[in-house]
Structures are given as structure tokens and as C-alpha cells.
Amino acid sequence: MIQTTSQNFASLFSWKEEDVQVSGITIPIVQRDYAQGRLSQEVTRIRNRFLQVLYESLVEDKKIKLDFIYGSVEKGMLIPLDGQQRLTTLFLLHYYIALHENVPPEDRSFLRRFTYETRVSSREFCQHLLNFTPDFSKENMSEQIKDEAWFLMEWESDPTVLAMLVMLDAIHEKFVNTNSIWEKLMGDNITFYFLPLQDMGVTDELYIKMNSRGKALTPFEHFKAELELRMKEVDEELAKEIIKEFDCEWSDMLWPFRNSGLGDAQDNVTDDEFLRYIRFISDIIGYQNGETEIADEFEIIEKRFSKACPKAKSNMEKLKSTFDIWVNCDIAAFFNSFISIIQHEEGKILMEVGNANLFGECCRTYGLRAGRRPLFSLGQTLMLYAFIIYLLHQRDVSEDEFRHRIRIVNNLVKNSSNEIRSDNMSVLLQHVKIIILKGEILTGGFQTTQVEEELVKQKWIKTNPEMAETLFRLEDHKHLNGYVRAVVGERLEHVDWCDRFYSLFECDLILVTNALLSIGDYFEKDAWRYQIGTSNPRLALGVWRSLFSPTRLENGLCIVLQDLLSRYDTFTNDVLKNIIHDYIQSAKEMPVRYYLAKYPQMQKSRWGGEYRFGKYYWRQHWENGRETYHVLMMTTEVSLGGMNYDIFLKTLFELGGGADAGLELGDYSYSQYNGGGLDKLRMTKQHLYLTLAENEYKIYSEDEEIVTEIETRHINQNDAGIDIEDRVEIGMQLLKKYL
């Protein structure tokens, strides 16, 4: 029986055991073209990684073994069945180093016994190449070769020749500044095992089957091979365990996630899923060490699992344990038992994601992006990490404890969008771990106000355990998103209003908006804008969440909302209509909120379109203790660059009959709202226009270029500068007088 021993490339040409002897190497015609020199992104990366390994083995004495090379030997010629790509690259490397270091012809003569039979042109190219000495001072080898008289134009259609040229350029770039490495090439720095397959009856049929059986090695197969090599340098036994689990337990565990919806419907491998979850683990390790994410999977090996990493063994153990927890686990059922994705369910947290199975989503989308947005967010990363910590420490954390603690994490994640950043993940991961393991909530990581509320809730639940589920149901209301202060107060004194709040927001949202305005001024400042609610079906969820969020919530809304909730056990549209009606009818003062509650034109886009974002702009809301009436309704969300209207002139335009009545309202677009009575509502047929200053209307006549003031109408206000007569009604009286 033939025993295999390690060989280098040169010794293979004189290999001999028993009655089998090798004197040359021939790549058979049925083999694939040389592929390691292709220019695709993936092959380029593999080529660069392989050359880096070869470079380190020769220049840094990091000896390597390139696994087995199989083949038959016929009349002294080795015909490789597996190993063609590696052998061709080694042939080109030996050629380059031999010429680069002026190795005598007799010492490199074995290279002439390497030949290609895949195409005649490939064979002839190799013969000519061995007679060519390049100018190593020049940047590019392939161009030199193409300039030679012996180089035939038809060779540019030979994929093997083209790939060899690319590889020679890559070798030149990598090894041009090396010296004295020929002896290492001829020694044991780069070796492999050779196994002749004489007993298998190798035929052309077998070659054809082996080379037409499917696809080239996948990126994951290259990744796994190098991962194994690097991990063995750190801890060989642990590396063997990990690789064994890759091929057995972990593959079985990931099998249900194959073809994760992003590739070919015939995809029946788990390569992509493996790589995405490994990338997730790598990023977690990186975040914990205060490092950035690593995009290239081969760089992950180098920086996380090789001897170059001081924590490589610890990282290998984390890799193993973070995979092992999912083995023998019904993963989908596990997540479904803790997560609801639609509405509140007792004992579960509410996560508005397409799939409760966070592990499956990670395997499907981690590292992928839609534009600049990651498909698997940092928030989901924190949540999946929380579940992983629980599974790793199930002996120490009961299921009931975890159900409560994961709710805390979920509330913090939902309301910390500004804090959840890559540069803050180290702190956040540590806080999540402490919450899950100990139930302790630390400050200085997640959003401060949300943290403060979670601390209050934690104490409150201990003294009010019978009300905990009511609190959780309130947290899960779609508009509150885990932050409940606006409803229950800072000390959670009104948790029993949960049903009231649900009934309120089952009503028409424009009625909710106006009922709140009827009770008080709850305009929330958003930078230089002011926000109230909206009923726009596309925008309402985001607007109300923004109003109730811990980053925006002001006492005004808390006071107004709690006043409204205190009045009724259950709310209906009729109840809200009565509140609004009673306010408008009994009002002795008419602040801006009065007009917004009374006139729907001030919340709708022009000509009665849908309700907008609920955003308004005052140049100054309050001035010298007085509320000002120069208010723009923004038809855009964050800019004054669109059409934005003075709410009173717009309302008069629409109530007065609009363009059909001969009225004309400019398409105002303010970069800085001038107010002060300079904006005009024109009566085009009468050649008149109306302006509205802080507390008076003026009517002007314009005849060609001559403008004449013809009437001023003062608006009565109290000593606080608040209207005590309806300025819209006054404006309508003026329009009727002159139209």
C-alpha cells in the first residue's frame, strides 16, 4: 500500500514509491481552465489571500501544507484530478522566483516538465514563457509578455492564458521586493500530500464527472479551509472540534435556513447563512473590544481567529458556544414563545419586525444593506445578543426572570435610536448582558429618560405585581412604543388608565388632536418647528410616537393628555366631538390652538387635501409673554422649502371660495417667515388684497403700480395679547364686503 508523504512542488517531479514514478505533470484536456487568475471580485479576493499565505510562508517562514493533491500516473506523467489550480499557481511562482533570483537553468529545468493539455495554445504559452526573462524593474509583466513577438493574438481568447497573465502580474506585485526565497521554495515551507489513484481505475470518464459535478468551490469553502488552518495554529484540538461541528451538528442546525430567500431557488446549501452568522459573532467580538466591523471574511479569520490575535482561543470558544446553543433547539418555536410581531400578547415582548425568529433573520440578512440602511439593524443585533446571553446562562436565569428582563431591553432599544451606534455598541452590549444576567439597569448607555423610566417601573412592579400585565399592555400600545410617562405620570400613578388610553386612540385621530387642543397648548418644540398630532394614515404612527417619545416629551402634552384621560372611563368619537364643541362654544379667549381645533383648513393641505404632518412654524411662538399669530402650516416635514401657508390667510382663501371666487393665495415658500402683514390674499377681480398683521387686517387697492390703503380692521385682544374675537370670522366679513 502506498504511503503518502509531504512533498514540495519540485520534489513531485521525481516522486517514486513502489512501482509508481512521476517525471512530469500534465493538466489533462478534460480539466477546467485555470481559474485563479480570473478577474471577478470573488476570485480576486481568493487570489490575493492565497498569495498572501504563500508570501508569509516564504518571507516570514510560516510553513504551510496545501492539503492533498490527487491524480493518476500514466507513463511517468502525473495527471491531477484535484489540485490543478494550486499546481498551476505554484508553477508560475517557481518560474517567477527562479528568474527573479537568477537561478541557473539546470536547477529549474523541472519546470519544463509541467504542461497544459486543456488547449494547444495553453501548452505552447507555457513553453514560450519558460524561455522569457522579464524586466523586473517594470511595473507590469503581462504587458511585457504581450509585446513579445512569440505572443499570438489568438491567445487573448484563451481563458487559461489570460488567467496566467493576471496571476503573473499579481505575483510580480507581491514578490518583486523579495530575495533569497528560492531555497525555501525548494525546502519544506510550502508542501502538500500527493495521493496517486492507481487503484481507482481513473479514466477520462471520472475526470469528466469530477469536473462537471457542479460549481467551483464556494467562498465559504475557501473561508472554512483557511479558518481551519489558522485555528489549528492557535489550538489544534479545539479547531478540530469546531470544524467537525461545521460539517455535522451546525450544518444540520442551519439546514432549515438554507436558501434564505435572497438567492437561487435551487440553493440547497447553507454557506451564506454560515458566513452571515459568523460575521455577526465577529462583530459582537469586535464591539466588545472597542473595534470596528470587519467587512472581509478572510480578514475576520486573521483578526479574530489566527495567532495574530491575542484573544484568538477565547474567540474560538465564543464561536463554538454561540453556535452550540442553537443545536437541538426548535429555534422558530423558541423565539415565537417570547416575541409577538403584531400586537400585545401576555408574557411576550412586541417587536415590529417581519419575523420573530431573530436568529433566522440574522442568517438571512446580516451584513446586507438596502441603500445605506442595514437590513439587520444594530437594534436587532442587541436583541439577538440578549437572547444568546440567556441561552448561554439558562442555569442562572429563570424563564420568568428573562421574560421581564428582555422587556426592559426591548423598551430601551426601541427608544434609543440616537444612542445605538457602532461606536457605542461596546457599552450597550455590556449593559444588555448585565440586565439579562442580573436584572440591573445601568445609566450612561441607553437613552437617559427611558432608563430612568425603566428604573421606576422596576421598583413599581415589585410593589404592584398584580398590575404588571396592565403596565406591559400599555407599553405595547403602538403609539407609546415602551415609554408610558405621558399617560401614567412620572410615578406611574395612572397605570389603571390603560383601557382609557386604548379607547382614546381607537377614535378618529383628528378628533383626538383637536380634543387635546381644546384642553391645552401641547405644541411640542422640534428644533425650530412645532408638532401636534395628525390623522394622516401614512404619517400618524410616526407622528404620535414622536410626540410621546422620551427624546421629545414635554410637560405640556403630559398635563393635557392626563387631563383628557381623567374625564372619561371610555372614549368615543361622540365624546371627543362634545369636548371640542363645548370648548369652541364657551371660549372667551382665542389662542392659536382654538383656531386649529375649530378650522380643519389649518391642518389640511391646500384645497382640502389630506391632513399633513402636524408641523407648524412660528418665527417666535411667544414674544414678550404673548403668543404670536404669525403661524405657518408646513406641508413638508422638515423644511420650509415647499409650499407653506399662513394658516389664517389659507383658511380665508378656502372659506371664501378659493380660485372660483376670484381669490388668489400665493404659493408661499419661506426660508424665513416674514409675517408682519406682508403676505397677501388677493381679490383679483376687484384689484384688492388683504393682509393680516399681528392684530389687524388691512385692505389695499392696487391699480397698476399705485397701491392705496382703503380699510383697517383691528382685532380685539385682551391684556395678554390673546384674541377675544374670532379673527377668521372678521376676515370673512371683510371678504364678503369687497367680493
Image (spheres, rainbow, N blue to C red):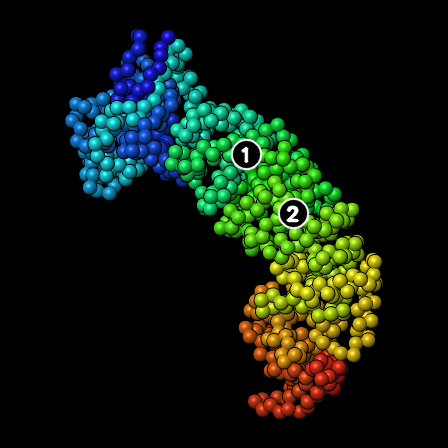
| Residue appearing at x 61%, y 37% in the figure | 390
Q: Dividing the picture into quarters, in which one does residue 381 lie?
A: top right
Quadrant of the image for the N terminus?
Answer: top left
| Residue appearing at x 65%, y 58% in the figure | 549
| Residue appearing at x 73%, y 70% in the figure | 520
Q: Tell me the amino acid under the disc marked 1.
A: Thr
Quadrant of the image for the C terminus?
Answer: bottom right
Question: How many marks overall?
Answer: 2
On the rendered structure, is 288 left or right of 443? left
Residue 195, given in percent of the width and then of the height, sits at: 36, 16
On the rendered structure, is 100 left or right of 83? left
Residue position marked by numbered label 1 in the rendering? 322
Residue 586, given in percent of the width and then of the height, sits at: 82, 75
Element carrying mark 1: helix
Residue 148, given in percent of the width and then of the height, sits at: 20, 37
**What is the spatial separation of the Cα atoms under label 2 and label 1, in whole angstroms?**
23 Å
Q: Dividing the picture into quarters, in which one does residue 110 lie?
A: top left
Residue position marked by numbered label 2 in the rendering? 408
On the rendered structure, is 379 left or right of 24? right
Task: Indicate which disc, 2 or 1, sits on the residue closer to the N terminus.
Answer: 1
Give the camera-side residue of 269 and 490. Answer: 490
On the rendered structure, is 656 left or right of 104? right
Q: Tell me the amino acid under the disc marked 2.
A: Ile
Depicted 706 relative to depicted 487: above or below = below
Q: Which mark is residue 170?
A: none
Depicted 603 relative to depicted 146: above or below = below
